[in-house]
């Protein structure tokens, strides 16, 4: 077999994945594009008609639209900061050997295996409930008035829940990365009397640059689509305090059953997500695809 | 030699701090587990009871109301099936991307990732209509395909990064020995990157197991996995915390245990090409 | 290795047989009905008692999809509207039944057997489920809103609750009984956003202040004085004399608070009576008084009517078996079965005259008389002081209602949580509702309300 032919046939191997993704992407996307130009309400099956760009205008002028964009950015940004900073600190903390290291690692990564809906339900009911939740008890223990988390600090509470879910992912990646760090280099630095802070800044952080980029990239993809946690805890409220773009699309699709507006909203969400992605890729892209 | 005691002290402090952080992060899960063994009245009591007479009554009630094994089996089939299907597609694709890159390879990879950004709720009705026409509502096959497709971009990308890190000389050597594409892959590439592939599969399994939007909206009963079972206990009237905790524990325990067992594997394998 | 594989495959085989037997039937005569229902106490009881039905109807298997109210509604609407055919029996409310009936998404339930005694069902409940003289759903239970109050506290403070109070009186009572230091709140009301949560209550308050959702030309009337008065009153009352964080409280949360003895008064659905009067679930059993829901300038539409009912989607392929089941689950025999198994007070309320003719029930359920009077007095055809083009007390029987009421409910809940003031919120709401109605074509001349808009 010639190298050339071989190359061609091997390149074909990528086709199933690409074709499947194309179908997955194109078919719903085409349908979404089509529906976004239609007045199509599930509750009015016989009333569909072409309306041009009206659905987009409708979605953009929704009273909560700009709030939802802002909330999306706040949610994604805060969770990224919390998980990356917390993840780095915790992984460095547990990097050195100590009794029970394996068990502590197991505890740390456990939240990653919990269903998002379960995580949200547990936080909302068992921990953050202002009357009988665990945190209310803790607050009272210190003589403080229990905080009514989801009513008074709704977005912060959602951020806490989501950050708890994703912190283990960051820890997992950073712990993995730290294992490959040059121990000898670190020990030599220690011998030279370098302080831990200096080692962290000049050795550890540069080593973690790429893993951080990876965490930011992957988490951003998932965080832009956070929905279950909001649906279970605050239902987007109070008011529109925790409504993000996917949740706004949800209210169009499954509260108003307005498929036209929801389709338009879905497309807007993709565009917004891609703008953010381009921004992120610019920021960290080099370390992702560099060989 | 005055340094030693301080260093030992620092170590002890660090160990204690590590344990503390670990326990805090784990606490919500522990609390859920404890609550699942309380009576409903105990679960709601203030101050909370740390010592209590454990009861299995919540588990009994759930098992009476729902066929747990049926839901668990659906979770295993759909998450497992999606992982197998995803790997079958992702490995060859990553192979082609890694060893025969073209100018568009980078763009295709990024485009794949961007497909994950279409919010599921926005395409629910189109997908529902497609499934209806294919007679695939409430079918495990539909869930397998959808889970596989949702995770495919991440899987391709992960595997691509592992393959990329394997020196091309090893492949060349295999080819010199006359190995074909299939043999190169199965005899050389896959064994070398076994760890990475296992991590990828695990990640796909976890994400599929925990998926709760499509599994709730595309199933009724035949194909409903554990995440749908949780939904049916999510907020009934009256006191429900203990039952909710029990059903959550039942739904999460299998994957949590699997995660713990494979912890070493995950810690070694989840590099995303970020580690040289 | 081989051994392991064998064992594995036999396990797989056994498991798939186990799953298959739950779904498909071995014999031809077997039918499996998929029932979508809501996870409240009455429905969970129905699920438990349905084994009796399976016993007496050999070959019929019941598959339950039990979901929380909002999730269920989304799931059912998606399936029914797209003719997905996934459900044989659905649990729907007073809002969906007439709309879906008008779309012919449901099987009409004509020619009911004499033994079912359809005339025993309350006339206005039946009316709510009827379109063009066809009954499209049968009621499982019905509720009106009523006033709950702590008779012991009222006696202690020398207060008397009139049988039919006004909202002003309610405020005065709340002011006297509010004692947050000792964990006693003057009044508990729904604050959680949702057209079936805060907007149900707020709808009745607006009605009793003389307001309405729409005028006869379908122009929204939200930015009008009655709405401003009603919503300002509601937000003021609840922030001053309510529990902390009221914007989080829906029916369930308030029920828990009242049953725990934290509320002096509570205006909500009459089905809560079963719980608050049950000493096993309530700390205030025996200390609760019941009155009609409060009114203000009018008593028209001051109490709501809600019905949970069972219906058969037109897309079901097993309509006969489904019909047999829903008639069983709403029959007098079923009510007697519940009473025998769980006690008289647990009987699903508000559907049949015969329930309220039973002395045993009236005695066991102290809330029964008020429920009965309230239900009889409700007139969904004339819900407001001023004329309106729609039916329904706390609901407006048009498909857009879910959208507009959810939106207004979200904004009002926000105002209750201290985000924005009431007058701005109502102004925003007015514009948003106007937008939705315009989009749906209500103002396209000539205005001919669509058929499904007026069941």
Image (tube, coloured by chain):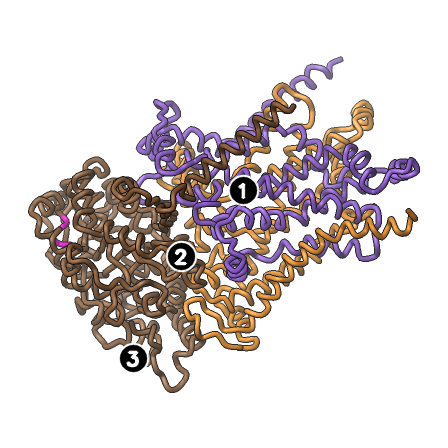
Chain colours: A orange, B purple, C brown
The location of residue A237, given as percent across then percent down, is: 44, 55
User: Which residue in the protein does label 3 denote?
Assistant: C216
Q: Quadrant of the N terminus of chain C?
A: top right
Task: Give the labeled residue for mark 2.
Answer: C76
- Dot 3 crowding, Cα within 10 Å, few <14, some 14–19, many 20+: few
Which residue is nearer to you in this view: B111 or B32? B111
- Which chain contains the residue that carries disc 3? C
The quadrant in which residue B20 appears is top right
Cα separation, mark 1 vs mark 3, equals 50 Å
- Seen as rendered, the residue at the extreme left is C359
As helix, strand or loop, the secondary structure at mark 3 comes to loop
Q: Is residue A267 left or right of residue C19?
A: right
Image quadrant where residue C24 sits: top left
Q: Out of C303 and A95, give the one closest to the viewer.
A: C303
Nearer-the-camera pick, C81 or C59: C59
| Disc 2 and disc 3 on one polypeptide chain | yes
Residue C368 highlighted magenta (yes or no): yes
Q: Classify mark 1: residues with Cα within 10 Å, few (<14), some (14-19) or many (20+).
A: many
Disc number placed over residue B210 in the picture, else none: 1
Residue C139, x across and y down, in percent: 24, 56
Front disc: 1 or 3: 1
Q: Depth-wise, is mark 2 or mark 3 nearer the camera?
A: 2
**For this view, does B268 lie left or right of residue C13?**
right
Are the residues flagged by discs 2 and 3 in contact, CB closer than 8 Å? no
Q: Is residue A65 above or below residue C441?
A: above
Q: Secondary structure at mark 1?
A: helix
Residue in the picture at 57% in, 57% down: B119
Q: Residue at x 47, y 30 (%)?
A: B30
Q: Chain of mark 2?
A: C
């Amino acid at each position: 077999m010639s190298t050339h032919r071989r190359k061609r046939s091997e390149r074909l191997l990528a086709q199933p994945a690409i074709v499947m993704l194309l179908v997955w992407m194109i078919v719903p996307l085409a349908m979404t594009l089509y529906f976004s130009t239609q007045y199509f309400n599930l509750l009015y099956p016989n009333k569909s008609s072409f309306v041009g760009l009206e659905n987009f205008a409708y979605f953009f002028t929704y009273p909560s639209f700009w709030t939802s964009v802002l909330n999306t950015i706040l949610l994604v940004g805060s969770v990224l900061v919390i998980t990356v900073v917390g993840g780095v600190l915790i992984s460095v903390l547990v990097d050195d050997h100590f009794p029970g290291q394996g068990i502590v690692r197991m505890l740390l990564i456990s939240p990653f295996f919990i269903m998002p809906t379960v995580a949200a339900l547990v936080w909302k009911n068992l921990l953050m409930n202002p009357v009988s939740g665990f945190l209310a008890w803790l607050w009272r223990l210190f003589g403080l008035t229990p905080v009514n988390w989801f009513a008074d600090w709704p977005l912060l509470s959602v951020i806490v829940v989501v950050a708890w879910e994703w912190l283990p992912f960051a820890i997992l990646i950073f712990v993995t990365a730290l294992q490959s760090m040059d121990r000898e280099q670190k020990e030599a630095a220690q011998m030279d009397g370098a302080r831990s802070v200096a080692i962290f800044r000049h050795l550890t952080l540069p080593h973690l640059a790429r893993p951080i980029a990876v965490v930011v990239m992957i988490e951003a993809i998932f965080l832009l689509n956070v929905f279950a946690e909001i649906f279970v805890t605050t239902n987007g409220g109070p008011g529109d305090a925790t409504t993000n773009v996917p949740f706004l699309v949800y209210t169009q699709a499954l509260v108003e059953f307005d498929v036209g507006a929801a389709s338009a909203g879905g497309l807007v969400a993709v565009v917004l997500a891609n703008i953010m992605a381009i921004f992120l890729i610019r920021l960290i892209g080099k370390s992702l695809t560099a060989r | 030699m005055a340094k030693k005691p301080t260093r030992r002290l620092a170590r002890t402090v660090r160990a204690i701090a590590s344990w503390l952080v670990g326990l805090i992060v784990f606490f919500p899960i522990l609390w859920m587990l404890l609550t699942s063994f309380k009576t409903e009245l105990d679960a709601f009591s203030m101050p909370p009871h740390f010592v209590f007479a454990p009861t299995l009554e919540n588990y009994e009630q759930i098992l009476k109301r729902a066929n747990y094994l049926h839901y668990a089996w659906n979770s295993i089939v759909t998450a497992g099936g999606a992982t197998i299907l995803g790997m079958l597609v992702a490995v060859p694709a990553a192979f082609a991307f890694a060893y025969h890159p073209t100018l568009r390879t980078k763009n295709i990879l990024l485009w794949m990732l961007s497909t994950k950004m279409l919010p599921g709720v926005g395409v629910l009705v189109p997908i529902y209509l497609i499934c209806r026409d294919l007679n695939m509502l409430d079918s495990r096959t539909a869930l397998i395909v959808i889970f596989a497709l949702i995770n495919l971009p991440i899987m391709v990308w992960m595997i691509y990064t592992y393959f990329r890190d394997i020196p091309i000389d090893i492949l060349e050597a295999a080819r010199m020995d006359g190995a074909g594409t299939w043999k190169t892959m199965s005899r050389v590439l896959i064994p070398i990157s076994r760890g990475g592939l296992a991590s990828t599969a695990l990640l796909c399994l976890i994400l599929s197991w925990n998926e709760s939007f499509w599994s709730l909206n595309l199933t009724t009963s035949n194909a409903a996995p554990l995440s749908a079972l949780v939904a049916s206990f999510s907020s009934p009237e009256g006191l429900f915390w203990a039952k909710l905790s029990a059903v959550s524990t039942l739904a999460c325990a299998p994957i949590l245990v699997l995660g713990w067992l494979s912890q070493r594997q995950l810690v070694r394998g989840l590099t995303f090409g970020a580690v040289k | 290795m081989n051994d392991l594989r064998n064992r594995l495959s036999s396990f797989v085989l056994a498991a798939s047989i186990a799953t298959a037997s739950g779904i498909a039937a071995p014999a031809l005569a077997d039918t499996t009905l998929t029932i979508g229902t809501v996870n409240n106490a009455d429905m969970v009881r129905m699920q438990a008692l349905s084994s009796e039905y399976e016993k007496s109807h050999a070959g019929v298997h019941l598959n339950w999809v039990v979901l929380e109210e909002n999730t269920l509604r989304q799931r059912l609407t998606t399936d029914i509207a797209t003719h997905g055919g996934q459900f044989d029996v659905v649990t729907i409310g007073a809002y969906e039944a007439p709309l879906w009936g008008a779309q012919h998404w449901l099987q009409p339930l004509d020619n009911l057997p004499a033994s079912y005694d359809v005339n025993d069902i309350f006339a206005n409940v039946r009316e709510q489920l009827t379109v063009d003289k066809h009954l499209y759903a049968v009621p499982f239970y019905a509720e009106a809103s009523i006033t709950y109050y702590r008779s012991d506290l009222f006696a202690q403070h020398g207060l008397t609750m009139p049988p039919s109070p006004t909202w002003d009186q309610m405020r005065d009572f709340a002011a006297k009984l509010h004692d947050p230091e000792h964990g006693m709140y003057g009044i508990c009301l729904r604050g959680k956003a949702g057209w079936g949560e805060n907007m149900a209550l707020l709808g009745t308050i607006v009605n009793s202040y003389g307001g309405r959702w729409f005028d006869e030309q379908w122009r929204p009337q939200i930015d009008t004085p009655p709405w401003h008065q009603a919503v300002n009153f509601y937000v003021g009352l609840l922030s001053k004399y309510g529990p902390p964080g009221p914007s989080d409280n829906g029916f369930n949360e308030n029920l828990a608070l009242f049953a725990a003895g934290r509320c002096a008064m509570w205006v909500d659905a009459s089905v809560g009576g079963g719980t608050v009067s049950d000493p096993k679930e309530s700390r205030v059993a025996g200390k609760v008084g019941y009155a009609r829901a409060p009114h203000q300038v009018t008593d028209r539409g001051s109490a709501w009517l809600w019905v949970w009912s069972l219906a058969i989607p037109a897309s079901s392929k097993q309509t006969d078996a489904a019909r047999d089941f829903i008639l069983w689950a709403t029959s007098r025999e079923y009510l007697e079965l519940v009473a025998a198994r769980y006690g008289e007070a647990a009987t699903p309320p508000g559907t049949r005259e015969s329930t309220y003719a039973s002395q045993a029930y009236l005695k066991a359920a102290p809330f029964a008389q008020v429920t009965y009077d309230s239900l009889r007095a409700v007139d969904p055809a004339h819900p407001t002081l001023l004329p309106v083009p729609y039916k329904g007390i706390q609901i407006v029987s048009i498909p857009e209602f879910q959208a507009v009421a959810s939106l207004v409910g979200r904004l009002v809940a926000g105002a209750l949580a201290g985000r924005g003031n009431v007058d701005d919120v109502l102004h925003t709401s007015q514009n948003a509702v106007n937008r939705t109605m315009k989009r749906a074509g209500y103002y396209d001349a000539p205005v001919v309300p669509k058929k499904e808009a007026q069941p």
